[in-house]
Image: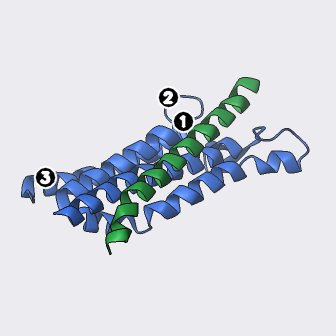
Amino acid sequence: MTSSILQTATRFLMPLLLLFAVFLLLRGHNEPGGGFVGGLVVAAAFVLYSMAFGVVASRRALLVDPSTLLGTGLLVALGSGVPAVLLGRPFMTASWMTVRVGPAAVDVGTPLVFDIGVFLAVIGVVLTIVFTLSDVARAED
Amino acid sequence: MILVDFRGFDTLGEATVLVTVAIGVRALLLIGRERQA
């Protein structure tokens, strides 16, 4: 199934969805959002892409294998707890520092690293399931 | 502070469950296919 309306809309929506996901990821700690929802939005964007252009094209657009993201994300999330242990504090104690980029000040800390890990893991989970399901469905045709 | 740090544990467990689910789905779907091949 190829629909040029869907394909054109997808081409417009993909960058918007991916930017929105990054926005959700970055505002996540103190306001609604976070790695989980951000990851779901990215995964939904790639599912939309695979509806419009096919699963093979969607896999190519993702650049990495979703099962790689799965493991990497979990390891990053787990690793974000380690610095606190090295400093002699309980595992996963948050440590923050403020990074100044010109006039803007951004709080960067281990919870952000944790959220990035969850973000990658959720993308990996959803896309592994969806791509595997559609591969099997296609093989049975 | 305590609330935020423990929320991290909760989410980490949640992510582990999801990763296990994805591995399980992939394994169960591919197990029959490789036997046929």
* Residue drawn at point x = 64 percent, y = 46 percent: A114
Task: Work out whether A108 lies above or below A3.
Answer: above
> Quick check: can you spot residue B1?
no
Looking at the image, residue A32 sits to the left or right of residue A55; the answer is right
Amino acid residing under circle 3: Leu
Amino acid residing under circle 1: Gly
Instruction: From the image, tell me which residue sits under label 2.
Output: A32
Dots 3, 2 in contact, CB < 8 A:
no
Task: Work out whether A105 lies above or below B4.
Answer: below
Pointer 1 chain:
A
Chain B display color:
green
Identify the image quadrant of residue A62. Answer: bottom left
Whichever of labels 1 and 3 marks the residue nearer the N terminus, that label is: 3
Instruction: From the image, tell me which residue sits under label 3.
Output: A6
Disc 3 secondary structure class: helix
Report the disc number at residue A28. Answer: 1
Whichever of labels 3 and 2 marks the residue nearer the N terminus, that label is: 3
Which corner quadrant holds the C terminus of chain A?
bottom left
* Residue drawn at point x = 37 percent, y = 57 percent: B29
Amino acid residing under circle 2: Pro
Looking at the image, residue A71 sits to the left or right of residue A33; the answer is right
Disc 2 secondary structure class: loop
Residue A8 horizontal/vertical position (percent) = 14, 56
Residue A28 horizontal/vertical position (percent) = 54, 36
